């Protein structure tokens, strides 16, 4: 076997293990870690050391990789933790199961949970974390991470900035049955090759059944828990600055619901920035307006770490 064939085989094997691209190590089926490049130096001593990215529901890794590239251009010396967020799994899992699945995120950010304690985490002044959450499904897994951290350390998850891209929306089933089923249908063709309308109808039926079962047993939905958790200072640190990115053209998460959540956050004492985009679809703001998008991220981060 020639050297070139061997190299090609190694590259192919690596790509299968790291769908986000070179340098990412698979921690679980959902969670991937890329350590900071050893040769990179921060553009600023106050740049984030860790960027934690929760994708939208059923987002393809190659699309999330574009956000990694954007953040890498802004903050070349950051470590990345990327969470893939499958919609179906999120909806049928209990909060306990989702939280357990997110514990490797905490280890990736702060070190081994066996050796870490709350004081060591809090005293790590060099650990500056920027969190980005995309769509409601990303928000559900972030909320599960918040819950897992509080159960382990008894405190709110420490971070310096939260970017909420196209999230959070309303938790009303009747209002959201159409948009949610559409979001599920968009991500389904890869494993359910049916006409879009049929797929959406099946998704709507599944959501209705899940909602009905939850109502019967008195369980809170994953969406309801996540929307409340982000504005709960026992779970989500109040000192972290927050940036909402959204548009009026989003047909899955309505802009009124995002502004309502931002207003509630302000009332609770969170520092909030809002950036509205023109003519962009759900989680499409960065793709259509990259300069506005990354400019807003950089500006809010700079304001978040003033006096750090």
Image: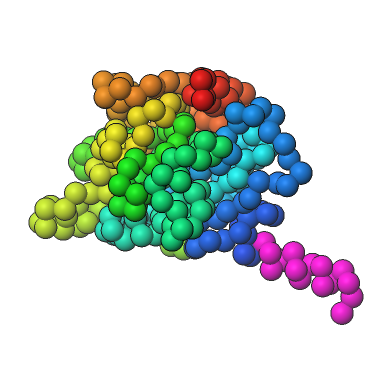
From the top left corner, tell me how far across and down residue 160 is, in percent: 47, 32
Pick the front one: 30 or 276: 30
Magenta: main secondary structure equals helix
Q: Is residue 6 magenta?
A: yes
Using residue 55 as the reference point, say whether residue 167 is left or right of it. Answer: left
Q: Residue at x 51, y 20 (%)?
A: 307
Q: Is residue 287 visible?
A: no
Considering only vertical position in the picture, is 212 above or below 179? below
Figure quadrant of residue 248: top left
From the top left corner, tell me how far across and down residue 27 is, in percent: 53, 61
Considering only vertical position in the picture, is 188 above or below 255? below
Q: Which residues are magenta?
A: 1-15
Q: Residue at x 46, y 31 (%)?
A: 161
Considering only vertical position in the picture, is 236 above or below 212? above
From the top left corner, tell me how far across and down residue 15 is, in percent: 67, 61
Q: Is residue 304 visible?
A: yes
Q: Residue at x 28, y 38 (%)?
A: 234
Q: Residue at x 35, y 29 (%)?
A: 238
Q: Is residue 38 magenta?
A: no
From the top left corner, tell me how far across and down residue 178 is, in percent: 29, 42
């Amino acid at each position: 076997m020639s050297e070139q064939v061997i190299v090609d085989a190694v590259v192919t094997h690596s790509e299968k293990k790291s769908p986000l691209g070179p340098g990412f190590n698979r921690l679980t089926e959902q969670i991937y870690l890329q350590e900071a490049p050893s040769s990179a130096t921060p553009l600023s001593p106050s740049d984030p050391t860790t960027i934690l990215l929760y994708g939208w529901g059923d987002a393809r890794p190659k699309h999330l990789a574009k956000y990694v590239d954007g953040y890498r251009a802004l903050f070349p010396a950051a470590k990345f933790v990327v969470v893939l967020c499958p919609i179906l799994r999120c909806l049928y899992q209990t909060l306990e199961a989702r939280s357990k699945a997110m514990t490797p995120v905490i280890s990736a950010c702060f070190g081994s949970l066996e050796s870490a304690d709350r004081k060591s985490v809090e005293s790590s002044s060099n650990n500056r974390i920027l969190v980005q959450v995309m769509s409601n499904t990303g928000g559900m897994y972030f909320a599960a991470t918040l819950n897992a951290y509080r159960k382990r350390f008894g405190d709110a998850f420490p971070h310096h900035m939260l970017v909420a891209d196209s999230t959070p929306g309303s938790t009303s089933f009747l209002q959201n049955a159409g948009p949610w089923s559409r979001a599920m249908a968009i991500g389904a063709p890869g494993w359910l090759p049916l006409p879009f309308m049929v797929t959406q109808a099946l998704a709507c039926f599944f959501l209705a059944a899940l909602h009905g079962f939850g109502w019967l047993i008195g369980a809170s939905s994953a969406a309801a828990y996540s929307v409340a958790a982000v504005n709960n200072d026992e779970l989500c640190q109040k000192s972290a600055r927050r940036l909402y990115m959204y548009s009026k053209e989003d047909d899955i998460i309505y802009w009124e619901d995002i502004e309502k959540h931002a207003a509630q956050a302000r009332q609770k004492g969170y520092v909030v920035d809002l950036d509205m985009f023109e003519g962009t679809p759900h989680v499409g703001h960065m793709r259509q307006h990259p300069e506005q998008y990354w400019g807003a991220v950089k500006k809010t981060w700079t304001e978040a770490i003033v006096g750090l």
